[in-house]
């Protein structure tokens, strides 16, 4: 694995962790998952399975540690790897057909909704709580999170892409 890539991915996870931690819980402690937008950005920048799996595991673990939702620890550990793999597959399908500046926000919205649906399903299955909460959770947490993550991706993706294009590897003299 490339050290430069691992450093960039760790920075994205760190930024996502701060965003995920400061966002307050909305519905029974469930909060919009801003860590997802950073995971998706990492997948778009480095769409290789080894990086995606590593990123998904790190993101799932950190989301599990910072969640306030009852049962969210288990749900995050299940949700993030599934979402990351589905996102990678979708990204690879559209990578050469659609401009990344368009596909990144669209896939981010789709990925956030998929992630939220998996998260809420796991929480409902394991806890049996929040009956009727799936639709409410989707409307009050997942859809707003999808909108915010999409806006984040619209703003951040071009900036990060430009920075990576300008960065040159450091060579010794």
Image (spheres, rainbow, N blue to C red):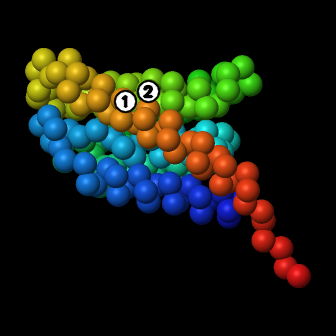
Q: Quadrant of residue 14?
A: bottom left
- Side of 104 where 49 appears, left or right: right
| Quadrant location of the C terminus in the rendered image | bottom right
Relative placement, left or right, of 122 versus 55 is: left
**Residue at the spot 85% in from the left edge and 79% down from the top edge:** 172
Identify the residue position indicated by label 1 in the image.
146
Residue 45 disc label: none
Residue 42, given in percent of the width and then of the height, sits at 57, 46
Q: Nearer the viewer, residue 75 or 22?
A: 22
Q: Is there any visible trace of residue 56 in the rendered image?
A: no
In the image, 79: left or right of 144? right
Q: Read off the residue under disc 2.
A: 109
Taking the image as drawn, is residue 36 in sight?
yes
Residues at discs 1 and 2 in contact (Cβ within 8 Å): yes
Q: Residue at x 26, y 54 (%)?
A: 22
Residue 90 located left or right of residue 149: right
Q: Where residue 142 sits in the image (x, y, percent)?
A: 29, 28
- Per the image, label 2 sits on a secondary structure element best described as helix
Q: Which corner quadrant of the image does residue 52 belong to?
A: top right
Which image quadrant: the N terminus?
A: bottom right
Q: Vertically, is 78 above or below 18? A: above
């Amino acid at each position: 694995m490339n050290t430069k890539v691992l450093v960039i991915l760790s920075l994205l996870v760190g930024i996502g962790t701060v965003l995920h931690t400061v966002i307050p819980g909305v519905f029974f402690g469930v909060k919009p998952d801003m860590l997802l937008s950073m995971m998706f950005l990492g997948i778009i920048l480095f769409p290789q399975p080894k990086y995606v799996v590593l990123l998904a595991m790190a993101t799932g673990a950190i989301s599990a540690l910072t969640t306030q939702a009852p049962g969210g620890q288990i749900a995050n550990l299940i949700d993030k790897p599934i979402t990351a793999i589905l996102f990678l597959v979708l990204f690879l399908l559209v990578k050469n057909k659609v401009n990344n500046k368009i596909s990144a926000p669209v896939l981010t919205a789709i990925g956030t909704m998929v992630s939220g649906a998996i998260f809420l399903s796991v929480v409902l299955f394991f806890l049996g709580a929040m009956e009727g909460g799936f639709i409410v959770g989707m409307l009050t947490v997942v859809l707003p999170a999808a909108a915010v993550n999409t806006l984040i991706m619209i703003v951040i993706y071009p900036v990060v892409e430009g920075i990576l294009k300008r960065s040159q590897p450091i060579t010794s003299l």
